[in-house]
Image (tube, rainbow, N blue to C red):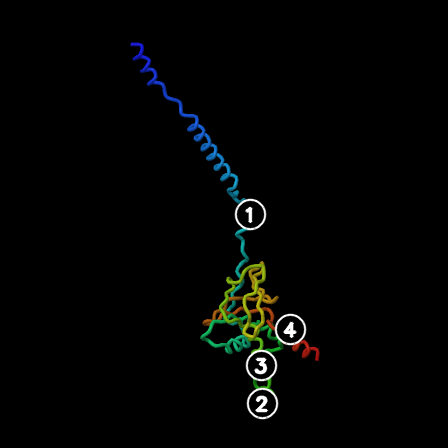
Amino acid sequence: MNRTTARRKRRRLSPLPPPRLLAVATAFALALLFLVLVLLSTSPPSPSPRHAVAASSTPPSPPRCGAASLGELGDAMLSMLPTDLPFTVFVPSPDSFRRVLRLQGRHANGSAAVGGGDTAASDDDNTYAVLSRVLGFSAVPRRLLAADVPPRVPVRLADSVSGLRIFAARDERGALVVNGVRSECVDVVRGLTVVHVMAGVLMDAEFERSFSVESDG
């Protein structure tokens, strides 16, 4: 009777786990706790509203050009390009043609429009030659919308058809700044050609000096 009672008591008592199994379980629990602490410490903090707004801020969109923004000389310059190839052209504004290149077009000069003769033909030849040179400096053989140009830091986009290196960025107002010349308006699409109207003229140093010499003379 006593032996049977003792056997029943031993069956009711839960055996203790072996020491090796207890050590493994403890090590696993500590490793899991350490991993959780590491993940919590390395997760990036949520940005404050002020920092989130600053990170997502982008320059505003530059003004778009109207239909008449290119002017007579700008349209004449574009007409020299082939229509079956993509181009981006940084066309001088009408004021830039007058101020920098001293070109006004035939309709802006009454005497040239009605005078005819050798003087009108000579003026036309000179205008065509100047527009051809400016087109070579201003035309890039690829399509570039204003949104394709990165903000703030100027980058080299491409070379013009005459080999002038083109560096551009968007300033804090969203306008394009190309080789130091700021845009007046952007993104005129003429078939495969994208036009940006500039408040100046893109040209190399030699061509710029030629106009300075003529002005001094």
Q: Measuring from the top left, give residue 133's x and y in whole percent.
A: 58, 77
Q: From mark 2 to mark 3, how far is it between C-alphas? A: 19 Å
Q: Earlier in the sequence, mark 4 or mark 1?
A: 1
Q: Earlier in the sequence, mark 3 or mark 1?
A: 1
Q: Write the residue at 52% across / 43% down.
A: 44
Q: From mark 1 to mark 2, how far is it between C-alphas? A: 68 Å
Three-letter amino acid code at the position of disc 3: Ala
Q: Nearer the viewer, residue 104 or 100?
A: 100
Three-letter amino acid code at the position of disc 4: Ala
Q: Earlier in the sequence, mark 1 or mark 2?
A: 1
Q: Are marks 3 and 4 in contact (CB under 8 Å)?
A: no
Q: To which residue does mark 3 refer?
A: 129
Answer few, some or many: residues within 10 Å of disc 3's Cα (few below 14, many 20 plus, some between 14 and 19): few
Q: Measuring from the top left, give residue 174's x and y in whole percent.
A: 55, 60
Q: Residue furthest top?
A: 1
Q: Write the residue at 51% across / 38% down.
A: 38
Q: Residue furthest bottom?
A: 117
Q: Earlier in the sequence, mark 2 or mark 3?
A: 2
Q: To which residue does mark 2 refer?
A: 117
Q: To which residue does mark 1 refer?
A: 51
Q: Judging from the image, what secondary structure is the residue with disc 2 in?
A: helix
Q: From mark 4 to mark 1, how far is it between C-alphas? A: 43 Å
Q: Judging from the image, what secondary structure is the residue with disc 4 in?
A: helix
Three-letter amino acid code at the position of disc 2: Gly
Q: To which residue does mark 4 refer?
A: 205
Q: Nearer the viewer, residue 82 or 182?
A: 82
